[in-house]
């Protein structure tokens, strides 16, 4: 039985899970620090039979052979020569003690196994033996005590090394037992311990980083699948997901090579994770990916935004979905999805234009065509089809909704929805198709909102990467510690017009600014779109506004880019005219129209605003 001994002035003794912890009364033997205070010394006892790895009835003749074999067993190369020598001395001392005990002729029955005491520079040798025995928790408790209470300077590095290796092995044990989050905590503790040492054992740090990267998908799934009431756990899972996507360079990226997930594995992982996410989480996470930009991110964000907009009766969220789909439409036509979102936005003429494009394309779905063609007219067919689609294709892949919750009749019957849609039906904010639709001889008349209460909306898969995405088989991930990355080439990202990027960036800024100054006081979100000096300036303004109890509600009405200059691939200057509706302390302050100049810089997360200047 191993015993952990702390020598201290308190003169107490207590039993722990590791054995007896004793407090010596022999004050004269205590070490003294520079201030004259006594300090604790860590001493441990080792069972000599276990040190050699032999049973208690092993004869003297066998001990020499066992010692020779044990001395040939090496330790990790990171150990110092001092630690290696200490381990060797402990093996030899255990052999000598056992040999001596066998050579004594006595009739006294031995009730306790022979032990040897270890402290000081010998301590790393003992911890290395414990590591071989799998006594990981004991290593951590003893190592922490040694580091806190003082140990030989030459032993410090080897003690830290053994503690980190114990964290590594505990993490891998929990991994094999499918306790993924607990495994991640152990690995992170080992990494943090190494990072605090200021650069010791870089190879071991890299090993921990690889394990953490490969474990992370499992942790994300485990955490996001927790009950909705466990907000801290699920929030941690989403934070890990954001970290992983950032390191990958997006859903389609391969930058996170350590995790062993290529493009197809990454898509399958997102497919496996999505049903555990709420619509709001999909909208937030995939919306951030869409702004990277990411084709798959834009498509999934549009799914989440449409479902969220219908669920919460927020057409402005569906309008964001329409914007993401327009981004996709430049390289991979998605006319049916655009027909659906424009229908939800009250743009029935545009919806019919995009529907006509879809019906004229070579990749139409026969069942979809049948539903549309057998209806009294195309608009009715689109409504009928999308109601079923919402209930079967969006609701099952979101954590917080049921098919009945995505009710188009309730959405269009909401007076606030109707008011917002009517507000948007002006020529200056009206949308136009990206590509000219086929000409039709007869066009049904524009429908009123009374008829829209029977309509529903949805998104359907189209060609491109999301076509591949939807057809991935729902296989379970099978990642092991030894599995190497799958060498799948990364697809070329779509080319985006700088003006479109600028418009997306400024629109995002207006939304985040509204959140920061509004009732939710989401000041932290400013860092998602601003960098210094603009970030510091606007953060201080928002903090001062809330400190004074002032709440502002900004509703963007119009945003037009008047001129822009691309300085280089990483910088551009944009001048824009903005019109928004402002409410201060709940009272209407009227519309505000102004011009501003924005300096944009490109970061690894996308375009950010560095400076904002009002123009006369």
Image (cartoon, grey):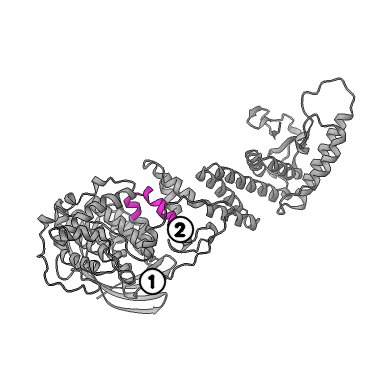
Q: Which mark is residue 31?
A: none
Q: Is residue 562 left or right of residue 75?
A: left
Q: Which residues are magenta?
A: 265-282
Rendering coords of residue 259 (x, y %)? 52, 57
Task: Note whether residue 536 is visible.
Answer: no
Q: Residue at x 11, y 65 (%)?
A: 444
**Pick the front one: 426 or 159:** 426
Q: Position of residue 318 (x, y in %)?
A: 25, 59
Which quadrant of the figure has residue 361?
bottom left
Image-based side of 69 in relation to 166, left or right = right
Q: Is residue 476 left or right of residue 422?
A: right
Helix, strand or loop at label 1? It is loop
Q: Which mark is residue 266?
A: 2
* 490 versus 413 height, above or below: below
Q: Residue at x 34, y 71 (%)?
A: 331
Quadrant of image for the C terminus: bottom left
Mark carried by residue 494: 1
Seen in the picture, residue 440 relative to 171 is either above or below; the reply is: below
């Amino acid at each position: 039985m191993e015993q952990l001994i702390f020598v201290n002035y308190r003169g107490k003794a207590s039993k722990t899970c590791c054995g007896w912890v004793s407090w010596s009364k022999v004050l004269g033997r205590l070490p003294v620090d520079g201030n004259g205070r006594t300090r604790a010394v860590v001493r441990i006892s080792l069972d000599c039979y276990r040190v050699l790895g032999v049973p208690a009835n092993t004869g003297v003749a066998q001990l020499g052979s066992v010692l020779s074999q044990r001395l040939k067993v090496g330790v990790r190369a990171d150990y110092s020569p001092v630690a290696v020598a200490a381990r060797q001395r402990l093996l030899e001392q255990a052999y000598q003690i056992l040999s001596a005990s066998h050579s004594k002729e006595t009739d006294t029955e031995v009730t306790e196994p022979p032990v040897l005491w270890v402290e000081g520079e010998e301590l790393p040798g003992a911890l290395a033996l414990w590591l071989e025995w799998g006594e990981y928790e004991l290593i951590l408790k003893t190592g922490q005590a040694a580091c806190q209470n003082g140990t030989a300077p030459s032993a410090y590095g080897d003690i830290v090394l053994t503690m980190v290796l114990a964290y590594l092995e505990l993490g891998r044990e929990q991994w094999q037992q499918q306790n993924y989050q607990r495994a991640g905590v152990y690995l992170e503790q080992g990494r943090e311990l190494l990072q605090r040492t200021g650069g010791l054992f870089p190879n071991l740090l890299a090993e921990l980083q690889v394990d953490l990267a490969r474990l992370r998908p499992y942790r994300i799934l485990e955490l996001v699948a927790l009950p909705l009431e466990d907000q801290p756990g699920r929030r941690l899972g989403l934070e890990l997901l954001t970290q992983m996507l950032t390191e990958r360079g997006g859903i389609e990226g391969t930058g996170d090579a350590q995790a062993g997930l290529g493009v197809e594995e990454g898509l399958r992982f997102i497919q496996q994770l999505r049903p555990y996410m709420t619509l709001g989480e999909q909208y937030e996470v995939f919306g951030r990916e869409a702004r990277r930009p990411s084709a798959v991110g834009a498509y999934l964000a549009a799914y989440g935004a449409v479902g969220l907009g219908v669920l919460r009766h927020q057409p402005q969220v569906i309008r964001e979905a329409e914007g993401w789909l327009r981004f996709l439409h430049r390289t991979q036509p998605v006319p049916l999805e655009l027909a659906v979102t424009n229908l939800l936005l009250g743009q029935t003429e545009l919806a019919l234009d995009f529907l006509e494009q879809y019906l004229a394309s070579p990749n139409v779905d026969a069942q979809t065509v049948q539903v549309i063609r057998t209806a009294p007219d195309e608009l009715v067919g689109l409504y009928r089809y999308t109601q079923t689609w919402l209930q079967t294709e969006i609701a099952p892949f979101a954590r917080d909704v049921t098919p009945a919750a995505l009710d188009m009749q309730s959405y269009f019957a909401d007076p606030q929805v109707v008011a917002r849609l009517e507000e948007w039906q002006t020529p200056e904010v009206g949308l136009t198709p990206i590509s000219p639709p086929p000409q039709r001889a007869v066009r049904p008349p524009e429908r009123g909102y009374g008829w829209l209460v029977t309509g529903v909306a949805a998104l359907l898969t189209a060609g491109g990467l999301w076509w591949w995405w939807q057809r991935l088989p729902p296989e379970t991930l099978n990642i092991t510690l030894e599995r190497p990355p799958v060498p799948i080439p990364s697809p070329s990202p779509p080319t985006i017009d700088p003006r479109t990027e600028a418009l997306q960036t400024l629109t995002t800024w207006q939304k985040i600014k509204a959140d920061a100054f509004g009732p939710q006081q989401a000041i932290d979100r400013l860092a998602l779109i601003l960098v210094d000096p603009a970030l510091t300036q606007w953060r201080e303004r928002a903090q001062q506004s809330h400190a004074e109890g002032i709440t502002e509600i900004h509703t963007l009405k119009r945003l037009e880019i008047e001129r822009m200059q691309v300085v280089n691939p990483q910088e551009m200057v944009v001048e824009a005219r903005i019109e928004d509706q402002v409410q201060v302390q709940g009272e209407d302050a009227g519309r505000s129209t102004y011009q501003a100049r924005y300096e944009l810089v490109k970061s690894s997360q996308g375009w950010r605003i560095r400076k904002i200047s009002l123009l006369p």
